[in-house]
């Protein structure tokens, strides 16, 4: 359920985001969209769905974004540690040319001209461009990362799902003051997240 985010009612009747979908309790599913979550808060839809009075934190939308970001960078870090993810312009460009890239990760605040130089060979390559260079850097244990890639298999599907949800919650909002001009290259058959 990549396009949905699960919430649960905590023991103290506070609505809690459940990014991994593993918390106990009846799930309340909301579209992974900033406007939809805010609408659920404003119209008290969480209480209606939970069939009880609940407390919704004022910072729920921000909490969702932070949790999704933390989960996504954690998944990318796991892929890096298992050898399925790598970073660096030359490494990514070479792998993309050979067709061994399943997911291309490009920082939204990176140079559009540089990002356009990397064109994957495969038709089903996903492009993730909802993270800033600093956020990608966290996943790779570096200060900044502009270009990164994932090999097929392993965590790539879960990373694409996580990025889809994060991009939906960000609704085109630029993370942490990043430059909005870097939206990723247009690629035939690519899915931009």
Image (cartoon, rainbow, N blue to C red):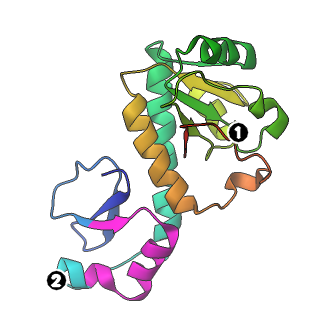
Q: In the figure, 91 relative to 25: above or below?
A: above
Q: Secondary structure at mark 1?
A: loop
Foreground residue among 89 and 14: 89
- Residue 126 at x, y percent in the picture: 52, 35
Q: Please provide percent x and percent y for residue 14.
A: 31, 72
Seen in the picture, residue 3 relative to 108 is either above or below; the reply is: below
Spatial distance from mark 1 to mark 2, Cα to Cα?
46 Å
Residue hosting label 2: 51
Magenta stretch? 29-47
Picture mark count: 2
Please indicate, yes or no, whether residue 32 appears anywhere in the rendered image: yes
- Residue 47 vertical placement versus 99 (above, below): below
57 or 149, nearer to the observer: 149
Discs 1, 2 touching: Cβ within 8 Å: no
Q: Give the mark, 1 or 2, whose residue is nearer the N terminus.
A: 2
Q: From the viewer's perspective, is 43 left or right of 10? A: right
Label 2 SS = loop
Verify whether residue 147 appears in magenta: no
* Residue 31 position within the rendered picture, expressed as x and y whole percent measured from the top left: 38, 66
Q: Is residue 36 magenta?
A: yes
Which residue appears at 80% of the width and 39% of the height? 112
Q: Residue at x 53, y 64 (%)?
A: 62
Would you say 178 lies left or right of 160 here? right
Q: Which mark, by number, is residue 185?
A: 1
Query: Closest to the observer: 83 or 67?
Result: 83
């Amino acid at each position: 359920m990549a396009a949905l985010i699960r919430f649960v009612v905590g023991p103290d009747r506070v609505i809690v985001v459940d990014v991994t979908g593993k918390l106990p309790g009846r799930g309340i599913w909301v579209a992974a969209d900033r406007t939809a979550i805010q609408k659920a808060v404003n119209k008290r839809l969480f209480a209606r769905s939970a069939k009880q009075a609940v407390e919704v934190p004022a910072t729920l939308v921000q909490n969702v974004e932070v949790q999704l970001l933390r989960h996504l960078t954690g998944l990318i870090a796991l892929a890096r540690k298992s050898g399925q993810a790598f970073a660096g312009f030359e490494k990514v460009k070479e792998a993309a040319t050979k067709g061994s890239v399943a997911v291309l990760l490009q920082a939204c605040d990176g140079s559009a001209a540089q990002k356009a130089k990397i064109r994957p060979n495969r038709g089903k390559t996903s492009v993730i461009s909802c993270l800033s260079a600093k956020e990608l850097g966290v996943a790779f244990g570096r200060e900044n990362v502009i270009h990164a890639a994932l090999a097929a298999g392993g965590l790539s599907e879960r990373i694409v799902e996580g990025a889809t949800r994060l991009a939906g919650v960000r609704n085109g909002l630029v993370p942490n003051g990043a430059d909005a001009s870097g939206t990723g290259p247009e690629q035939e058959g690519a899915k931009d997240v």
